[in-house]
Amino acid sequence: MSRIVSDIECPNCGAPLKLSPGELVATCRYCGYTSVVGANTPFQLEHSLIVNELDSTRIAQYLQDWMRSGFMKPGDLAKKSRITIVELRYLPFWLVPLTATSTYEGVLERISPPTQRRGAIENNYDWLVLGRKAAEFPTRDYKVPSEGKIPFDFTKIESKSNFLNSELDSSEAIAHAKDEVEENQRFLLKQEVDQVTRFDTTFNVEKPTYLHAPLWFVQYEYKGKSYNAIIDGSSGTVIRADIPQTDFKMI
Ligand SMILES: [Zn+2]
């Protein structure tokens, strides 16, 4: 698929590690050893896998079920649509456990008279960061199924699947998680005050987990147009899918 920049050897078995530009974490396709590229001393990274439980036939069934259920979908969607592409991708994620404590001062204006408020918002998160920079994936809509999680086992990776290495190392993933969590804390603050005069967040970060999760990328055709869907290979949940526009007749 992508251009290969370097043929580094696997520190464990010596097999060539094929890496694409920008990839920072490498998983050997022969022995499953996962290491950080360019680290001074090679060290094995703790790595987990969410096991794929489905095949393309089951994926088609899950998508058909989705098409038949819920509102705002054309009534003949399941019957008239045709699946054109079904691809299993193992996407790399960092799961960052952290506690964020935001102290704030502000003014509550929705009551009269406006009053000064100060306080703290503290929350624990298991924040999910996608290890790819360009890929579009709705991480906030995806809950990592902890039940299907095992230590990484390369023999469980289907040879026809598309296995992607992470372009972010652990510290970049932490930085990313902090930014997004701070934004989330700021959002939660809107319940407490209307005007923010001071806002400071401190983080207590625990060790992130590196994991691969099976996601099915599906394309289907309906009335000559193409639509996309992403389905969780562990549970069959439709994480996100395009719904064709319909002309609703108001009677
Ligand atoms: Zn190896």
Image (cartoon, grey):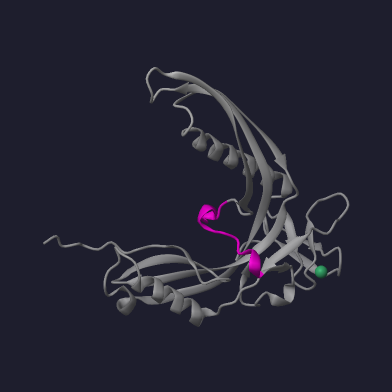
Residue 115, above or below 71:
above
Q: In which quarter of the image is ligand 1?
A: bottom right
Q: Whole-percent x and y of residue 65?
A: 40, 75
Q: In which quarter of the image is residue 15?
A: bottom right
Question: Where, by quadrant of the figure, is residue 70 drawn?
Answer: bottom left
Q: Position of residue 165 (x, y in %)?
A: 68, 60
Magenta extent: 134-148
| Nearest the eye: 41 or 7 | 41
Q: Measured along the vertical axis of the image, is residue 21 above or below residue 28?
A: above
- Is residue 136 inside the magenta stretch? yes
| Image position, residue 51 (x, y; %) | 65, 72
Question: Left or right of 113: which side holds 43?
Answer: right
Q: Residue furthest front?
A: 112
Q: Is residue 202 magenta?
A: no
On the question of residue 167 being in view, the answer is no
The image shows residue 141 at horizontal and vertical percentages of 50, 56
Magenta span dominant secondary structure = loop
Q: In which quarter of the image is residue 232?
A: bottom right
Q: The N terminus lies in which quarter of the figure?
A: bottom right
* Residue drawn at the location 82% of the way across and 65% of the way down: 10
